[in-house]
Amino acid sequence: CDFSQLVSMLKERPEDFVAFVGVLPPGSFNILSSLLQEKQVVLPLSPCPPSAHLIAQRAWQKWQQSFQPDDPISLTPLYVLPSSAESHLGITVSLRGEG
C-alpha cells in the first residue's frame, strides 16, 4: 500500500505508540500530521536517502576509531535490494573479473 494508506490503517489500530524506521517518502510529513494527533509517533527516519557525504563522514568516524585501513579491492557492498543490472539483466559487477 502507499504511505497514506499505511497511516490510515495505523490510525485504526489499537496501539497508542507507533515507530517508523526507514526513509520517509516525499510529502509524508503532511500525511503524518493526522496520525500525530491520535498516537505517539517516533520518527527515527530520514526525509531522503543518506547522501554520499554522510556515508563518507560515517566511514571516516569509524576509521578514526580503529585506524585500520581497508583494502578497497576486497570491500564488498551489501545491498538491501539487487542493483538494476542484477535484477533486470542478470549481470554481476566485480572488480576481480568474476561473474
Image (cartoon, rainbow, N blue to C red):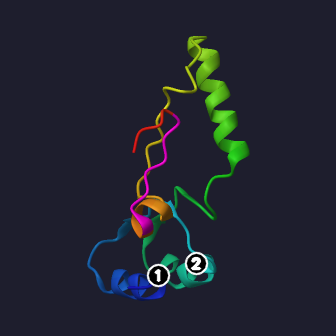
At x 37%, y 84%, the residue is 11
Q: Which of 24 and 43 is in front in this view?
A: 24
Name the residue located 41 percent from the left edge and 58 percent from the top edge: 82
Label drawn at residue 15: none
> If the image is split into quadrants, where does the N terminus sit?
bottom left
Does the magenta segment cover residue 79?
no
Residue 53 x/y as whole percent: 73, 44
- The amino acid type, in three-letter code, at marker 2 is Ser
Extreme-right residue of the structure: 53
Q: Mark 1 points at which residue?
A: 3
* Residue 28 tag number: 2
Question: Residue 94, how many percent across, how many down?
Answer: 48, 41
Determine whether 98 is above or below 37 in the image.
Answer: above
Between residue 69 and residue 64, name the one nearer to us. 69
* Location of residue 58 with respect to 1 vertically, above or below: above
Look at the image and give the residue range highlighted in magenta.
89-95
